[in-house]
Each structure stands twice: as structure tokens, then as C-alpha cells.
Amino acid sequence: MSTTYDFYTGTFFGKKIPESDFDYYAARAEEYISARCGSVPAGEMLDKAVCACAEVYYSSEPGTVLSSEKVGDYSVTYSGGADMSQSLESRLIAVLSVYLPAVGWC
């Protein structure tokens, strides 16, 4: 895997994905980038792209995004993602275009 949880939290400043889940979502992100972009030079921008895609995948899972919380008579509601009106594919392309603009499809 090209990036680590330390990079995710320390350089990318990610906060959404718990450490216990990071490797799974980062691996899915790398597979997506590899399938769509082919060979992309290793480096910080690729690591950031992996982190961004991993967050999109993580946020797309049901029950991973806190949509509301009430303190009095405690109540919590989770949703399936931040913006479910956009397809997963379009959200992945949008975040990749920030980090890998030289890739033709981004």
C-alpha cells in the first residue's frame, strides 16, 4: 500500500476513517486509482489521492456518517453518506481531480 494511517492523519489531516478501518478503504482506493488511471507516479499527491478516495468510500458505507445527535434524552442518527445525490463514481472523480489533474479522465 502506498500510504499509511500516519500520513492520513499527519499530512492529509484526515479525521473520518478510524485507524482500524483505514487499510481496507485505502486498499480499495488504490485499486480504483490503478484501474482508472493506470500507472501513476508514487509521491505525496498519489498518497493524498488515496486518502481522499478512501474517505469517499468510507463515507459511502451505511452507518458511517453521523447526521444528527441530540444530548437531552440521548439520540444519534447515522446516514449512508454526506451527499448521496451524487453517484459514488462522480464523487471519486471529483476528489481525484484535485490531486491527479494530469490524468486525462479527472
Image (cartoon, grey):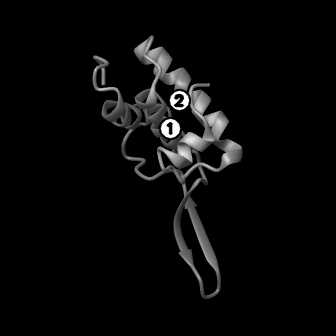
Quadrant of the rendering where the C terminus is positioned: top left
Q: Residue furthest right?
A: 20
Q: Earlier in the sequence, mark 1 or mark 2?
A: 2
- Between 45 and 71, the residue placed more toward the observer is 45
| Amino acid under disc 1 | Cys
User: Please, is residue 37 above or below residue 17 in the view?
Assistant: above
Please give left or right for residue 72 compared with residue 96 in the image.
Answer: right
Please give left or right for residue 101 compared with residue 58 in the image.
Answer: left
The location of residue 41, given as percent across then percent down, is: 43, 16
User: Please, is residue 76 above or below residue 39 in the view?
Assistant: below
In the rendered structure, are the residues bearing label 1 and label 2 in contact, judged by CB atoms less than 8 Å apart? yes
Q: Secondary structure at mark 1?
A: helix
Q: Which residue is mark 1?
A: 51
Q: Classify 10 Å Cα crowding around label 1: few (below 14), some (14-19), many (20 and above).
A: many
The location of residue 38, given as percent across then percent down, is: 44, 11
User: Please, is residue 1 above or below residue 12 in the view?
Assistant: above
Q: Secondary structure at mark 2?
A: helix
Q: Residue at x 57, y 61 (%)?
A: 78
Q: Residue at x 40, y 50 (%)?
A: 83
Q: Residue at x 35, y 32 (%)?
A: 99
| Amino acid under disc 2 | Ala
The location of residue 28, given as percent across then percent down, is: 58, 28
Q: Which residue is mark 2?
A: 29
- Between 92 and 42, the residue placed more toward the observer is 42
Q: Residue at x 59, y 83 (%)?
A: 71
Q: Residue furthest bottom?
A: 72
Tell me which corner region of the image, top left, top right, bottom left or bottom right, holds residue 89. top left
